[in-house]
Image: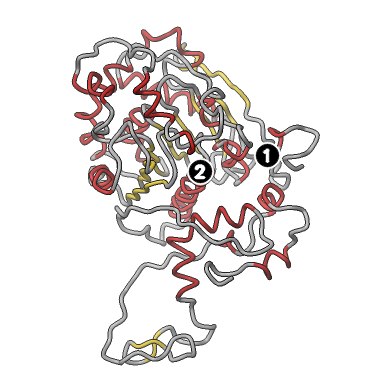
Amino acid sequence: MTPDSAAGPGAWADEEAGVTGEPVRQIVHVDGTPMSALVLAAPQPRAVLVALHGGAVTSAYYDATYPTPHTSLLRVAAALGYTAIALDRPGYGSSAAHQERMATPAERVDLAYGAVERLLDGRPGGAGVFLAGHSAGCMLVTRMAADPRGAALLGLELAGIGLSPHADAAFMMPLVTGSVTERPQAPGPGLQEALWKPRRLYPPRASLSLRYAVSPVYEGSEVRNWVGAFPGLAALVRVPVHYTVGDHERVWSSGPAALAQVGALFTASPRVVTVEQADAAHNLSLGWTALSYHLKVLSFLEECVVARQRPSLPMQPRLGARTRSAVCRRAPGLGRFTHLVTSQFRVVHTCAEHRHPPPRPGTPRFAQGSSKTASPRHPAEPAQRTPAITHRAPRPASLCLPPAHFRRLYLPPAHDHARFATNAQPAGKQ
């Protein structure tokens, strides 16, 4: 099945794994409170991704199919073999009429954990559960990770949140300073501009395609107390953390200093990766770079899965670097998928492998005296020079030959295995 089949644009699937591309709305009850979610399950998942949306929206935030289905985090995750769940946070969806049962943070954490447990009842969970949150949803997933039950999680993704409001976000000051004690008012011009500008970063009418909801009463106090509670909660998180902020974020502080500030809070985490997503504003999952952002999150999730399944392979140490998606020249004859994946892995993978390719099998990496083996491309260096020790991540297999279901999704039918392999060229070598 392809995106252009008669089943419609929302029906693309991973045929080999049997994953259909249409999320199903499900409702489970946690101590009498109905909790709703969008679920797209894989038959034999590598792991489970649970995503929690931000304020004034619903779980549909993670299933945006405009302008194309691959904008949806749920559908991309399922196509890669993960069970994906977008949970309506307490006070949203089917639980909106039961706000008296979620007045405290502890009650909301219990509701969220209970909902995930019941949604996965009788289903395979793979290596475990990975939590992802956006904006106000980060407040709940951070509390879930800081809870004693959070030690069993695979990892944590935080996006569109920070430790201090952006300097231009005057509308945030009443919330964080405590002058607002009730439910936040309807979004005003300042908030709308911060969420949806620059317009060029979003597809036309992207804001109109989003389903909005009324924020629960507790959300005002949650935002007001966040700046003071975040450092203490982050220090209790003991799983890997991936933190993302758009380079055009205008609600919370962004930039290298803000990334480093938030990354430094997770003192007990074995690994912290901070990322500045290029060409993205607050709503990372709705812009033109939504797929780019989602692939980064899923790549980190896969690394957490490998670390869980292969404990003998230690995870990389803490990382607080600011990374951007580099522009990569497209190799002639290759399709959209190659360009997208290559552009996202260029900083970590492509530059290291293409500019400094490894020697052929049987050739030692370094000769005696710590100098490189002489070759036409790499002349011998002076013996007294000690080469710099740098981390070189393995080049992902997707850069050489993407999985079959992604070839069907992003490559024209004419691009077969041989043509894909022979046309692939290193970045900048066309």
Q: Nearer the viewer, mark 2 or mark 1?
A: 2
Q: Quadrant of the N terminus?
A: top right
Residue under the image location 43 percent in, 54 percent down: 307
For residue 346, say whether it is visible.
yes
Image location of residue 39, percent across then percent down: 58, 29
Three-letter code, disc 1: Val
| Number of numbered markers | 2
Q: Estimate the x, y position of residue 42 in percent, counting from the top left.
A: 62, 39
Q: Residue at x 66, y 64 (%)?
A: 332
Where the C terminus falls, by quadrant? bottom right
Q: Position of residue 168 (x, y in %)?
A: 27, 31
Q: Which labelled disc corresponds to residue 396? A: none
Report which residue position mark 1 lands on: 19
Q: Amino acid at mark 2?
A: Thr
Of 238 and 411, nearer the camera is: 411
Q: Is residue 235 left or right of residue 77?
A: left
Question: For mark 1, does the 10 Å Cα neighbourhood hold few (<14), some (14 to 19), or many (20 or more) residues?
Answer: many
Q: Which residue is mark 2?
A: 289
Is there any visible trace of residue 244 in the rendered image? no
Q: CA distance from mark 2 to mark 1?
A: 24 Å
The residue shown at (66%, 60%) is: 334
